Image (cartoon, grey):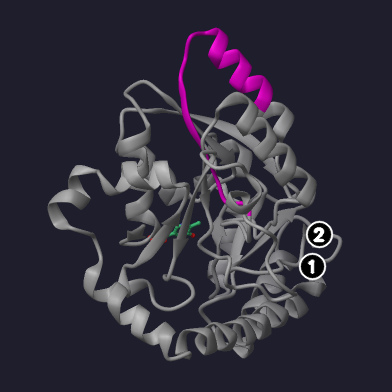
Amino acid sequence: VITAGTSQALDLTTTLFSRPGDTVFIEQPTYHLAVRIFRDHPVELAGIPADEDGIKVDVLASTLDRLKRAGKRVAFLYTIPTFHNPTGAVMAADCRRRLVALAAAEQLRIVEDDAYRELAYDGPAPPSLWSLAQPGVVIRLGSFAKSLAPGLRSGFITTDAETAARIIDSGVLDSGGGVSHFASLVIAEFAGSGEYADNVERLRAAYRRRRDALLAALSGLEGRASWRKPAGGYFLWLSLLDGMRTSELLELAEAQGTSFMPAAPFYLDPASGARSLRLSFSRYPPEMLAEAGRRLLAAAARGPLR
Ligand SMILES: Cc1ncc(COP(=O)(O)O)c(C=O)c1O
């Protein structure tokens, strides 16, 4: 189903597949603007912890059990298993399998945000949850925002025929006939000419260089922070080791003329993000990222860990 991007698809999905008072599960941390979309609906949010290998399936199972016993209905789980925003993490293969098995057994719908799939730098992206699950479990949201241009406002949903039919039968698609006709037909032309595939290759090469420039610049932080090399997407997640809070580092970094996104907005409980931050390497050329890394190091050297 063609959408006007992942944001619109999330809004429509929440409209169609939740009822007032339902719970929506979200990973912690998660894409903070998805949370804003959910908050436009009369649903409750419940955070499920995740680490670099993906969502904690055991915690998900016990939370689901507890809510069901309390008579609550869970609308769906929202997850970003591939090149996560904000952490850059990739859900491990075993976690993917356990997650889709639990979802099938418990009839828990999964909304898979797959916005960064095309931006894989170290080999192919892992199989989507949608491709692993039996039909009816996963609604996968794709986007052309990262692989082509966000301003086109075009994306797509891949799901089973029955779920797709429910989406196509929504009032908004019935009335408008679609949500992104012109841009989607432009993209279809572009893809048909082979240019889209070439563009994705160009982006991969450029962002890989940017990621590597940032990683090289960060090596001086070893021992004071920990991070994982992101295999795709836009983001690198940094956890500060003992001694410094993100808010302190942000102030020092801005005094050095660089900045980053502190982790607090990515959590339902902002205190959880006190020692983490998100660095984005998608926007600036390698030499600027190297300079930003030097400034971040200079900022860290002025903090309590110097
Ligand atoms: C995880 C995630 N989902 C969705 C979006 C928004 O996608 P779109 O522009 O297709 O609405 C973003 C953009 O930053 C994102 O990071």
Residue 207 in the figure: left or right of residue 58? left
Image mark for residue 221: 1
Amino acid tagged 1: Leu
At which x and y percent is residue 28? 60, 40
Residue in front for this viewpoint, 188 or 114: 188
Q: Which residue is mark 2?
A: 224
At which x and y percent is residue 141? 46, 55
The answer to whether residue 27 is magenta is no
Q: Residue furthest top?
A: 70
Q: What is the secondary structure assignment of the residue under circle 2?
A: loop
Question: Could one spot residue 11 in this view of the protein?
Answer: yes
The answer to whether residue 76 is magenta is yes
Q: What is the secondary structure assignment of the residue under circle 1?
A: helix
- The relative height of residue 57 versus residue 112 in the rendered view (above or below) is above
Query: What stretch of residues is rendered in magenta?
Result: 61-81
Q: Quadrant of ligand 1?
A: bottom left
Q: Are marks 2 and 1 in contact (CB under 8 Å)?
A: yes
Numbered disc total: 2
Image point 25% across, 44% down: which residue?
169
Image point 58% across, 66% down: which residue?
117
Image point 19% across, 48% down: which residue?
172
Q: Quadrant of residue 227?
A: bottom right
Image point 33% across, 59% down: which residue?
3
Q: Residue furthest front?
A: 161
Residue 111 in the figure: left or right of residue 129? left
- The relative height of residue 70 versus residue 216 in the rendered view (above or below) is above
